[in-house]
Image: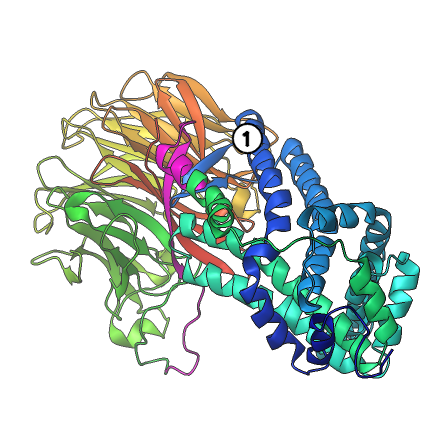
């Protein structure tokens, strides 16, 4: 036996022996695997294709039982947090995938070794040889799991001990790199038929004189480059779920030959560098030989494309009738430029508490009113998907920014928005001379302007500035303005506040007529403009809902005529004896819509037990109502929005925090059907608004809030809600 090469019959192994001594293992291995890809990818297809089809079929059955699921942006998605059946399914699929990889990887290493050594290897023989070595492969998997767990625990332990994040990451990376030569135990198990312990010892003995070169070769060739390729595919196909799923499947199957060839070539390269010709000869002679066969690319390509074709057909046909949803992440969290001068108006930016109202449908545009602690803004979208959005200031600079705005869509499609104007000097100065005047802005899809000829509708001082305002459009094109304000200290009803209604015959409100119509208990906490809701029935008669944030009580004020010469006050929801709730997501919520016959529909969150309920008022005054429970007691819910669809059904949207879902309850009278429509990916609990688009479909705008700047503004449109 010569030191120049193994004494193997024929010269192909001898020339391969010299080739294996070349450096550049990763690139040589990748190029070699690409040339022989059709043959090397077959073990993965034979194992993972049936496994994937069985797993998907089982998932469909489980989802129909445990669900729900939807077709979101052209791709199947589970909605909400998974239940126990789905967790069991996930664990089973993971175990089955690892078991399959315990056969596929060593079988592919065998095939790659044969081709690298210039010998034809039997496909069936390689799979059988790999399957017979499963006890040793299982031991390697267990050892690898323990090693990775120990490396990760060491890094996090160091982080908890020292708080030095960079140092902890560096230590963790070093330990993982030091552990990567364990991958070279796979050839030792399947090629040399060693036990797991003996194969690991051989792997570290072969790499003893080049530990870092070996570690980095395995890190980049087996882990990093395939992961980067997968990430690049995800980014490139982010807007096309069918293509993304298909490309991810193809890449996952193709990555195995690349990884196996890197492992096989590096193992043989270390043998060649060490001059271990006898071991190489033993490996070549032990390979399951086969007669040369021509490559059959057509069946292989068909198998690679089959899952994509099946998935695409299932999405297009949707044979199970799953809900179809369009969803867009409009913008991610951001903060204002801290370098901006306090007196120089910066460009408008968004923050997570901003969402106030949503309007859609007319002209194909969608508008969100955004307001929190500065001037109000408009986020205008070209359509209900909101793929393109434009953010602009709604209010001028000289306003009381701490007062949230109220808004309403007028019959001509424009928006009416309230604004509290102050003199420029008093934007930053508060004294006994401070005054704010209530006026109106009229907004189209591009900008807001003061109502021409509009008059001041109210004026407050600093001490009495907590006024609550609500708007509603009148059928004839006018406007209704509802206001809550404190009573005089001399008034005998000092524990109450007054509700006044201002009626305007046109959007400009040039000739307002104001009348005090009712007194309701004082609300010491104002819910950011959400504790007063104004409405007008088809006969132009005003209706107002007052939500008491102190007690959870709801008062309904209804008028007998458009001028509200006579008003009725009813309390369909009583006081909550538990008192004030401090958790922002637990505070009472309410929404109101007016039926075509003038009767109100009221959705509210009962603070006593956390249930979401719908009141179907039997009369306009809502002295009596039928009740439907939309969400059970003992569950965590947040957000509330309601619209009437074209069929007159009530659509009530809320966030189910326990299941990480946003749910729309569709109610005909008090018969309601709940449909989860999207997943809350963070913790949720903030910001939810709903409107109907131009085709009568509900559109949801909501804030997927985590913490700090970890939030998204999301628009979700259920396309096939029944």
Judging from the image, what secondary structure is the residue with disc 1 in? helix
| x then y, percent, for residue 97 | 68, 46
Instruction: Indicate yes or no whether the magenta region holds residue 333.
Output: yes
> In the image, is residue 181 above or below residue 371?
below
Instruction: Indicate yes or no whether the magenta region holds residue 185.
Output: no
| x then y, percent, for residue 157 | 82, 67
> Which class describes the residues within 10 Å of circle 1: few (<14), some (14-19), or many (20+)?
some
Q: Is 294 on the left or on the right of 136, as rendered?
A: left
| x then y, percent, for residue 170 | 74, 78
Residue furthest front as drawn:
10
Residue 466 in sight from this viewpoint = no
x 82%, y 70%: residue: 280
Closer to us: 430 or 150: 150
Q: Which residue is mark 1?
A: 63
| x then y, percent, for residue 262 | 67, 69
- Residue 378, by quadrant, is bottom left
Q: Is 329 on the left or on the right of 271, as rendered?
A: left
Closer to us: 710 or 486: 710
Closer to us: 188 or 593: 188
> In the image, is residue 512 above or below residue 18?
above
Q: Quadrant of the C terminus?
A: top left
Magenta residue span: 311-340
Q: Quadrant of the N terminus?
A: bottom right
x 92%, y 60%: residue: 197
Residue 303 in sight from this viewpoint = yes
Closer to us: 517 or 11: 11
Q: Is 659 on the left or on the right of 395, as rendered?
A: right
């Amino acid at each position: 036996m010569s030191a120049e090469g193994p004494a193997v019959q024929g010269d192909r192994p001898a020339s391969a022996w010299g080739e294996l001594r070349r450096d550049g293992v990763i690139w040589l291995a990748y190029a070699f695997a690409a040339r022989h890809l059709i043959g090397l990818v077959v073990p993965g297809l034979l194992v993972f294709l049936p496994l994937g089809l069985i797993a998907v079929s089982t998932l469909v059955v489980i989802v129909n039982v445990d669900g729900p699921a939807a077709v979101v942006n052209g791709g199947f998605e589970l909605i909400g947090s998974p239940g126990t059946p789905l967790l069991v399914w996930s664990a089973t699929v993971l175990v089955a995938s690892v078991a399959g990889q315990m056969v596929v990887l060593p079988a592919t290493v065998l095939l790659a070794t044969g081709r690298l050594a210039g010998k034809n290897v039997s496909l069936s023989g390689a799979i059988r040889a790999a399957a017979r070595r499963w006890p040793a492969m299982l031991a390697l998997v267990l050892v690898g799991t323990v090693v990775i767990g120990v490396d990760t625990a060491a890094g996090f332990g160091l982080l908890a001990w020292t708080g030095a994040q960079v140092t902890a990451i560096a230590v963790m990376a070093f330990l993982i790199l030091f552990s990567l030569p364990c991958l070279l135990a796979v050839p030792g198990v399947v090629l040399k038929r060693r036990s797991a312990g003996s194969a690991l010892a051989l792997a570290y003995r072969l790499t003893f004189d080049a530990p870092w070169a070996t570690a980095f070769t395995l890190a980049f060739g087996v882990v990093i480059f395939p992961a980067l390729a997968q990430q690049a595919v995800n980014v490139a196909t982010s807007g096309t779920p069918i293509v993304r799923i298909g490309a991810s499947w193809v890449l996952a199957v193709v990555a195995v030959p690349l990884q196996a060839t890197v492992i096989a070539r590096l193992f043989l390269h270390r043998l060649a560098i060490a001059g271990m010709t006898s071991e190489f000869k033993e490996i070549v002679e032990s390979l399951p030989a086969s007669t040369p066969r021509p490559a059959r690319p057509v069946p292989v390509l068909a198998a690679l494309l089959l899952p994509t074709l099946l998935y695409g057909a299932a999405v297009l046909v949707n044979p199970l009738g799953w809900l179809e949803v369009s969803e867009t992440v409009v913008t991610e969290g951001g903060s204002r430029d801290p370098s901006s001068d306090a007196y120089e108006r910066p460009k408008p930016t968004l923050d997570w508490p901003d969402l106030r109202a949503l309007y859609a449908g007319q002209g194909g545009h969608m508008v969100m009113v955004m307001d929190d602690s500065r001037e109000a803004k408009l986020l205008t979208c070209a359509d209900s998907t909101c793929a393109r959005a434009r953010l602009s200031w709604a209010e001028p600079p000289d306003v009381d920014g701490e007062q949230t705005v109220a808004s309403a869509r007028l019959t001509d499609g424009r928006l009416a928005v309230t604004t509290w104007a102050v003199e420029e000097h008093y934007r930053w100065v508060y004294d006994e001379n401070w005054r704010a005047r209530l006026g109106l802005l009229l907004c189209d899809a591009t900008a807001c302007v003061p109502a021409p000829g509009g008059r001041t509708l109210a004026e407050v001082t600093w001490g009495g500035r907590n006024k609550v305002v609500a708007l509603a459009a009148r059928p004839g094109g006018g406007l209704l303005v509802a206001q809550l304000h404190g009573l005089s200290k001399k008034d005998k009803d000092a524990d109450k506040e007054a509700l006044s209604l201002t009626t305007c015959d046109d959007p400009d409100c040039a000739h307002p007529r104001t009348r005090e119509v009712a007194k309701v208990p004082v609300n010491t906490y104002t819910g950011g403009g959400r504790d007063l809701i104004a409405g007008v029935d088809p006969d132009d008669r005003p209706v107002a809902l007052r939500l008491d944030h102190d007690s959870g009580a709801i008062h309904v004020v209804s008028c007998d005529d458009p001028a509200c010469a006579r008003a009725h006050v009813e309390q369909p929801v009583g006081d909550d004896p538990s008192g004030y709730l401090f958790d922002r997501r637990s505070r009472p919520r309410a929404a109101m819509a007016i039926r075509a016959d003038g009767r109100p529909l009221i959705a509210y969150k009962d603070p006593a037990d956390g249930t979401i309920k719908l009141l179907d008022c039997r009369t306009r005054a809502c002295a009596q109502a039928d009740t439907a429970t939309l969400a059970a007691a003992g569950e965590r819910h947040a957000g509330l929005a309601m619209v009437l669809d074209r069929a007159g059904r009530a659509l009530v949207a809320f966030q189910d925090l326990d299941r990480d879902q946003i749910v729309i309850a569709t109610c005909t009278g008090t018969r309601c059907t709940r449909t989860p429509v999207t997943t809350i990916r963070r913790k949720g609990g903030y910001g939810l608004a709903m409107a109907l688009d131009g085709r009568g479909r509900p559109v949801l705008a909501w804030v997927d809030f985590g913490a700090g700047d970890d939030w998204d503004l999301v628009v979700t449109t259920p396309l096939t809600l029944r």
